[in-house]
């Protein structure tokens, strides 16, 4: 269409202007260039793999050269440009990696940075300094604590579960139960790296829930003070060897830090104290049990582009979305609350954006358990997969009770993708006391099936989504009832589990939060060859190396946009164009995951994290660093 319009203009111009034929030639040439450029960008959207920086902020609407285009296509095209920008910063040698570190971090790299980069090179790792932003976001506030105080707050006597390194050996120290078996997974990874690691103590959180929520005012002040004090030590001052730590059985330098753990009350009240004062959630109280569960927004979500997730980071931020206090089990009643408002080092697998825990790759990603890793094989070819959605899981997410279960995210998710429940909502026959969701306004997402009142019937043909167990609080009195729950039995059908490798036979694999993050996400990306649909509130170690709309398809935590997403990829009558686009996303997601989410990549992340944390705890930290030929820069 662009070329026809420009050609028509050129003809009129040549008739009205002297030298028109010559001008016409230039305009025809320009038309050809513009057309080729448009075709190139469309092709790129279908073929290029990548991700953007940690923020994933597409704050300006993506601009494309052809109309009409679906918002999802525009988001993909814009994301591709972000990916190219990011990969242009890849470091291919030690000198470049060190320089880019110094430019981005404002300090010299930590000691033994050269050994770290050698390992990366030998394992064909893609080294982009931005990939490690999470480490520095997590650690920067701790620069405002003196090294001696950091050692006091992180030592074995202050915590129940600690992984220590002494003289290049990893030591596991636990004084309490670890029911999920997470500590051995983390310990094995550190043990693999121990020959290169300095002395360090890593206190670890083995609970599902993240545990640190320091008020915003304190963290903001610490972050500002750290930034103001940051400097590159002159070469003459640099020291290149860590001091080391006393033996584990030696007398402590001083009494261990006494942490005040909060075990009762509203988690939302704790969280909103960690929100900026001007954020939408800061002054919003938690809900009471009489709050209407379906009082959920049905307008386009904030930080979206025509209703679809545009800013992945802010879409997960509860400070930006006060309605989530009534739509996610974390804020209704988590399985356990054991939270501190003090800044202490505590390492764990996931956290909300406001938490001050320090992220590690989750233990489940290191496991070979079939529940989280499948059988380690690959899914079938795209053409052999069913054009539908599959999900199985338990009704987790917190302590759902008779008076609160309709507020829980997994219950809402299963209802919204269940054809029978959606049909009942369309016809007004879903009982109010058993309703967890609202349907989007008619025409809001342009869903064809929704427009003619048959969304429920269509979903029945394309989705296979169900609970395998209904968890209740209090727990059922007999083992025979453990899969059921009296107050949710009327609304949910419990179905048998589907092994992960069998789920790979479907083209679309949704993944949502449980008690915290979902342990299946990495395996879905790494092995399935299906499109992963992802909604979460939780940050993980890999966020800055995965790109929404390229490696997976994000959806909002209200789940209001899921119908538009499925309609775009499955229902569109477009001669298979959108199905082909889905195939590209699935394939590129798997290829990319096999480049940046390998065990070697997790090892590199943990290695870098330990180097940085060990430096933080060293009395000479301000002059500790790696130095080679940076003097010349």
Image (cartoon, grey):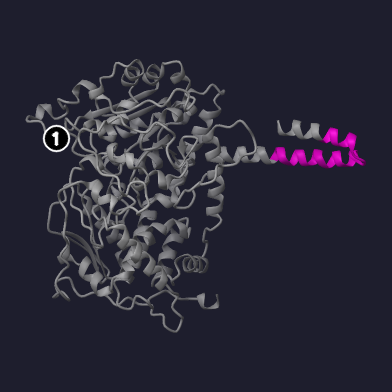
| Placement of the N terminus among the 4 image quadrants | top right
Label 1's element?
Answer: loop
Residue 269 picture location, percent across and down: 24, 48
What residue is drawn where x is 16% and y is 27%? 485
The answer to whether residue 121 is magenta is no
Q: Nearer the viewer, residue 192 or 362?
A: 362
The answer to whether residue 35 is magenta is yes
Assess disc 1: are there few (<14), some (14-19) or many (≥20) residues with their C-alpha within 10 Å of its C-alpha: few
Picture mark count: 1
Residue 448 picture location, percent across and down: 48, 20
Does residue 197 appear in this view?
no
Q: Is residue 596 above or below residue 463?
A: below
What residue is drawn where x is 44% and y is 64%? 117
Q: To which quarter of the image does residue 521 belong?
A: top left
State which region is magenta: 10-36
Q: Nearer the viewer, residue 549 or 441?
A: 441
Residue behind mark 1: 473
């Amino acid at each position: 269409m662009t070329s026809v319009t420009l050609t028509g203009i050129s003809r009129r111009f040549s008739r009205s202007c002297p030298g028109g034929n010559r001008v016409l030639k230039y305009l025809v040439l320009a038309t050809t260039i513009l057309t080729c450029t448009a075709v190139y960008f469309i092709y790129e959207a279908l073929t290029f793999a990548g991700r953007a920086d940690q923020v994933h902020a597409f704050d300006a609407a993506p601009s494309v050269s052809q109309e009409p285009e679906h918002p999802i296509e525009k988001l993909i095209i814009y994301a591709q440009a972000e990916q190219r920008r990011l990969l242009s910063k890849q470091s291919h040698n030690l000198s470049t990696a060190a320089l880019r570190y110094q430019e981005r971090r404002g300090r010299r790299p930590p000691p033994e940075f050269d050994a770290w980069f050698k390992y990366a090179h030998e394992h064909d790792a893609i080294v982009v300094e931005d990939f490690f932003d999470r480490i520095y976001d997590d650690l920067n506030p701790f620069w405002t604590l003196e090294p001696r105080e950091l050692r006091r707050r992180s030592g074995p006597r202050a915590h129940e579960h600690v992984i220590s390194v002494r003289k290049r050996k990893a030591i596991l120290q636990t004084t309490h139960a670890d029911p999920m078996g997470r500590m051995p997974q983390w310990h094995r990874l550190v043990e693999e790296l121990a020959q290169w690691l300095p002395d360090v103590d890593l206190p670890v959180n083995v609970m599902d829930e993240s545990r640190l929520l320091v008020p915003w005012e304190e963290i903001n002040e610490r972050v500002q003070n750290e930034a103001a004090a940051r400097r590159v030590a002159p070469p003459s001052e640099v020291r290149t060897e860590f001091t080391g730590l006393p033996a584990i059985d030696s007398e402590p330098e001083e009494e261990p830090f006494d942490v005040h753990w909060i075990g009762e009350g509203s988690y939302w009240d704790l969280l909103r104290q960690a929100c900026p004062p001007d954020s939408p959630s800061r002054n919003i109280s938690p809900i009471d049990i009489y709050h209407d569960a379906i009082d959920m927004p049905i307008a386009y979500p904030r930080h979206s582009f025509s209703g679809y997730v545009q800013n992945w980071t802010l879409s997960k931020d509860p400070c930006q979305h006060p309605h989530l206090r009534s739509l996610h089990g974390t804020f209704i009643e988590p399985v356990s609350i054991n939270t501190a408002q003090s800044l202490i080092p505590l390492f764990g697998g996931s956290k909300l954006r406001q938490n001050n825990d320090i992220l590690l790759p989750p233990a489940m990603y290191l496991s070979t358990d079939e529940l989280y890793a499948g059988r380690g094989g690959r899914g079938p070819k795209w053409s052999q997969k069913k054009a539908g959605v599959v999900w199985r899981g338990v009704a987790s997410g917190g302590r759902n009770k008779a008076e609160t279960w309709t507020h829980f995210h997994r219950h809402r998710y299963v209802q919204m993708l269940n054809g029978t429940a959606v049909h009942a909502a369309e016809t007004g026959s879903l009982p109010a006391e058993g309703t967890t969701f609202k349907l989007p306004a008619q025409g809001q997402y342009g869903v064809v099936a929704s427009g003619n009142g048959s969304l429920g019937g269509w979903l029945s043909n394309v989705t296979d989504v169900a609970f395998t167990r209904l968890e209740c609080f209090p727990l059922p009195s007999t083992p025979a009832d453990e899969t059921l729950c009296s107050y949710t039995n009327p609304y949910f059908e419990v179905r048998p589990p589907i092994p992960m490798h069998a789920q790979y036979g479907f083209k679309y694999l949704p993944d949502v939060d449980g008690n915290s993050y979902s342990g299946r996400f990495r395996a879905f990306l790494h092995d399935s060859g299906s499109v992963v649909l992802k909604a979460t509130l939780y940050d993980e170690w890999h966020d800055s190396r995965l790109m929404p709309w390229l490696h997976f398809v994000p959806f909002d935590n209200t789940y209001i946009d899921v119908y538009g997403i499925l309609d775009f990829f499955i229902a569109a009558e477009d001669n298979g164009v959108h199905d082909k686009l889905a195939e590209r996303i699935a394939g590129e997601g798997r290829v990319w995951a096999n480049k940046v989410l390998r065990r070697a990549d997790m090892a590199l992340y943990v290695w870098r994290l330990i180097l940085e944390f060990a430096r933080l705890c060293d009395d000479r930290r301000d002059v500790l660093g790696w130095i080679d030929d940076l003097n010349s820069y």
